[in-house]
Image: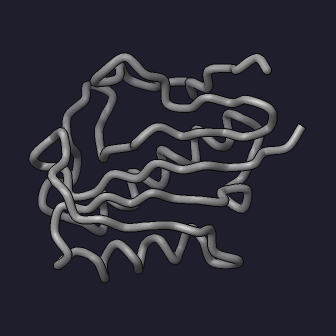
Amino acid sequence: MPKQSIIPPGTGKPLAPYVPGSLADGILYVAGTLPLDKDANVVHVGNATEQTRHVLETIKGVVEAAGGTMDDVTFNMIMLKDWADYAAINAVYAEYFAGEKPARYCIQCGLVKPEALIEIASIAHVGK
């Protein structure tokens, strides 16, 4: 089962040795995605709503580069810095997953960039 790296055009250099997405046998694994610009700076500092939107737009770009849509996302792993942002995160999340929702989990934890309020990793079945 060969795998294919998915790196959308304009993707910045990652913080560690990984690629934004890895596609194997029709399953796309999207790496943990922080609200970062192309220079690895956190965007929308202090704003969970806009950080979530940025993260989901980045994930959408990876999914589309693999030939899928957000409807193909089947699982999300959400890491947030503070439960106080949970409602704001869910409001934006609901915009991106308006129809049938993917399975998910959500945990509170420290993130690799202290200014980041959210990180999401995803799995999508983009088919063959």
Q: Nearer the viewer, residue 65 or 109?
A: 109
User: Which image quarter is the C terminus in?
Assistant: top right
Q: Nearer the viewer, residue 30 or 98?
A: 30
Q: Residue at x 18, y 39 (%)?
A: 112
Number of labelled discs? 0
Q: Which picture quadrant has residue 63?
A: top right
User: Which image quarter is the N terminus in?
Assistant: top right
Q: Is residue 15 above or below residue 107?
A: above
| Side (left or right) of 121 relative to 85 | right
What is the x, y in percent for residue 27?
Answer: 72, 40
Q: Residue at x 69, y 20 (%)?
A: 4
What is the x, y in percent for residue 88?
Answer: 30, 77
Q: Residue at x 30, y 46 (%)?
A: 35
| Side (left or right) of 47 relative to 5 | left
Q: Is residue 39 above or below residue 70?
A: above
Q: Nearer the viewer, residue 83 or 66?
A: 83
Query: Which colour assignment does the render follow?
Result: one colour
What is the x, y in percent for residue 13?
Answer: 35, 19
| Side (left or right) of 109 relative to 120 | left
Q: Residue at x 57, y 28 (%)?
A: 8
Q: Is residue 100 above or below residue 2?
A: below
| Side (left or right) of 25 relative to 29 | right
Q: Which residue is the extreme one toward the right?
A: 128
What is the x, y in percent for residue 14?
Answer: 35, 23
